[in-house]
Amino acid sequence: MKRLLEEKAESFGALGRAAVDLARAESDSLSGELKDSGRTLGRSTVFILLALFCFFWALGALAFLAVELLAFSFPRWGAVLLVFTVLLVSALLLATIGWLRIKRLEKPAAMVKRHWSEYRDWWSGRWIGERHRRSDTRSSDEAP
């Protein structure tokens, strides 16, 4: 009887250590995904800042030169309109790329919830599967 209790205590101890190891692995996995998400957010922010940079400086610095060069072929107002349109489309394209990259990010709360749900499903599936296998082996042992 004492040996049986010691075996049960040892198996419960192993189960506790396994649960701690599993929780640590899940935490490391979640941490890695949060780091990746942060990196993607940073890169997306760079795209948006580049779009703003292009819009601000290109509009001021290159507009004058482009208008003067196009004034040879178009009326001055047409040259200004053409340069403005090109710069505006470029800025909108860069901003759209940055925004789409941000929208692909998973929110940190949703990421934690997903990890917890996967962990819970895995643990319950493993626990139920283990109990189911034990009952199958017992029924096969009891069969004549």
Image (cartoon, rainbow, N blue to C red):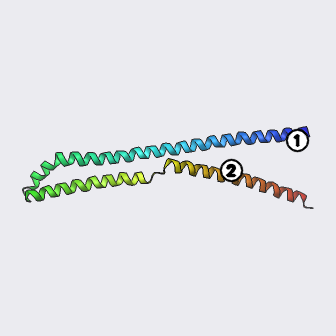
Q: Quadrant of the C terminus?
A: bottom right
| Residue displayed at 70% across by 54% down | 125
Furthest residue toward bottom: 144
Identify which residue, 71 or 109, lies in the foreground.
109
Question: x, y (%) of residue 109?
Answer: 52, 48
Number of other residues with Cα within 10 Å of mark 1, as a class: few under 14, some 14 to 19, many 20 or more: few
Name the amino acid, label 1: Leu
For mark 1, what is the residue? Answer: 4
Q: Position of residue 79 (x, y in %)?
A: 12, 57
Residue 62: % across, % down? 17, 48
99 or 141: nearer the viewer: 99
Where is residue 18, by image quadrant?
A: top right
Q: Secondary structure at mark 2?
A: helix
Residue type, numbered disc 2: Trp
Question: Viewed as shown, does residue 69 lie left or right of 122?
Answer: left
Q: Residues within 10 Å of mark 2 (few under 14, many from 20)?
A: some
Which residue does the image show at 90% across and 61% down from the upper left?
143
Going 71% across and 52% down the picture, which residue do you hit? 126
Q: Is residue 116 left or right of residue 106?
A: right
Q: Quadrant of residue 84?
A: bottom left
Q: Residue visible at 50% across and 47% down?
A: 108
Q: In the image, 125: left or right of 82?
A: right
For the residues labelled 2 and 1, the Cα–Cα distance comes to: 26 Å
Give coordinates of residue 81: x percent, y percent: 15, 57
Q: Which residue is mark 2?
A: 123
> In which quadrant of the rendered view does residue 49 lie?
top left
Give the mark nearer the N terminus: 2 vs 1: 1
